[in-house]
Image (cartoon, helix red, strand yellow):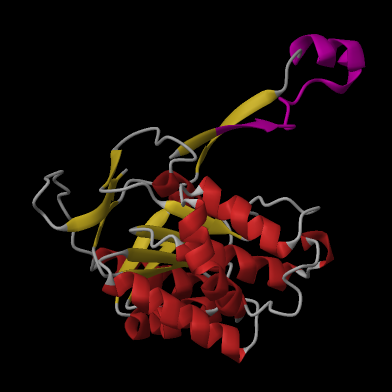
């Protein structure tokens, strides 16, 4: 996945040519190509919960945008058996409306009928943990409260593919328990969940598989315990200034990856596949 972005860098010129000549030489801003996500193949089957980890700029959010259909891949293809539901901390609800009004608005946007909303309203409020604040305007909520409400709304629709971007990093132990239970219920109904988080504890508690991205590359795909262990070793080497050792570890782990051939068939039983 590549982006064209504006760069303020200009070609060096002789100092005595002056500012006007510089303007003539660079009449428009320069653009550069950024590789946000490199070539990878990934298959996720029904019932799986997948954690996505990596440093800032590793391609996590780009992957989520590709899966959710917010952006088109510049190469490769994405196949999904149903429309993915994207839940992020910036998911748009109306700040001037109250929490209960936003529940109705959000559920209608997901295609639920008013009867279905009435049936699930109490469950949504319970999962969010906002019983005492549900009738207050969202602009009075903290970022954590807003994230919890967004999760509760998105999860109530029983999506087959749910994408969660940093929305579960805020909240108390009760909310963590409720959200994990809800995710387990979604997976039990043949859904799959993607969770992006910088919290390795959240990843280990709520996922059964972890994908590690770094600078747009797929580095490791495996069990939460194994992947987070190697990722922790890598980041510790970097923080200690051992960059050569860190890059050597990264290369060794990536070399052990098995290349998958993604085939789009209707009988494979998968819920999502991406080849980019």
Q: Which residues are magenta?
A: 4-26
Tell which residue pokes out farthest to the left in this image: 267
Q: Residue at x 26, y 51 (%)?
A: 273
In the rendered structure, the answer to whether residue 29 lies left or right of residue 149 reads right
Split into 4 quadrants, where in the image is the C terminus? top left
In this rendered view, identify the residue nearer to me: 201 or 85.
85
Q: Quadrant of the N terminus?
A: top left
Quadrant in which residue 23 is drawn: top right
Asked whether 251 or 218 is in front, the reply is: 218
Residue 140, horizontal then vertical, whole percent:
84, 66
Q: From the top left corner, tell me how far across and down residue 246 is, in percent.
A: 47, 73
Identify the residue shown where x is 55% and y is 66%.
Answer: 151
Res. 58 visible in picture: no
Query: Is 21 in the magenta?
Result: yes
Residue at horizontal 40 percent and vertical 48 percent from the top: 67
Q: Residue at x 75, y 16 (%)?
A: 26
Asked whether 196 or 236 is in front, the reply is 196
- x and y, in percent, of residue 169 in the image: 60, 76
Quarter assignment of residue 163? bottom left
Q: Position of residue 61 (x, y in %)?
A: 52, 54
Residue 130 in view here: yes
In the image, is residue 205 part of the stretch drawn in magenta? no
Q: Is residue 14 above or below residue 75?
A: above
Residue 184 is left or right of residue 100, and the answer is: left
The residue positioned farthest toward the bottom in the image shown:
173
Extreme residue toward the front, this view: 115
Q: Is residue 59 left or right of residue 78?
A: right
């Amino acid at each position: 996945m590549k982006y064209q972005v504006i760069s303020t860098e200009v070609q060096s010129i002789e100092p005595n040519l002056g500012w006007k000549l510089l303007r003539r030489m660079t009449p428009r801003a320069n653009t550069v190509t950024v590789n946000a996500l490199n070539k990878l193949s990934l298959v996720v089957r029904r019932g799986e919960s997948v954690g996505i980890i990596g440093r800032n700029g590793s391609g996590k959010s780009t992957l989520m945008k590709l899966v959710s259909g917010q952006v088109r891949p510049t190469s490769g293809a994405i196949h999904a058996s149903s429309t993915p539901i994207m839940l992020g901390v910036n998911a748009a609800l109306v700040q001037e409306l109250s929490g209960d009004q936003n529940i109705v608005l959000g559920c209608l946007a997901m295609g639920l009928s008013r009867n279905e909303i009435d049936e699930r309203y109490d469950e949504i409020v319970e999962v969010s943990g906002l019983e005492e604040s549900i009738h207050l305007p969202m602009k009075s909520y903290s970022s954590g409260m807003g994230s919890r409400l967004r999760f509760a709304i998105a999860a109530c629709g029983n999506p087959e593919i749910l994408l969660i971007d940093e929305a579960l990093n805020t909240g108390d132990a009760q909310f963590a328990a409720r959200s994990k239970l809800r995710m387990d219920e979604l997976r039990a109904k043949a859904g799959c969940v993607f969770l992006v988080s910088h919290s390795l504890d959240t990843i280990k508690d709520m996922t059964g598989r972890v994908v590690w991205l770094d600078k747009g590359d797929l580095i490791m795909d495996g069990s939460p315990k194994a992947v987070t262990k190697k990722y922790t070793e890598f980041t510790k080497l970097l923080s200690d200034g051992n960059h050569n050792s860190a890059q050597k570890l990264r290369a060794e782990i990536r070399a052990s990856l098995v290349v998958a051939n993604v085939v789009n068939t209707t009988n494979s039983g998968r819920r999502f596949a991406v080849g980019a």
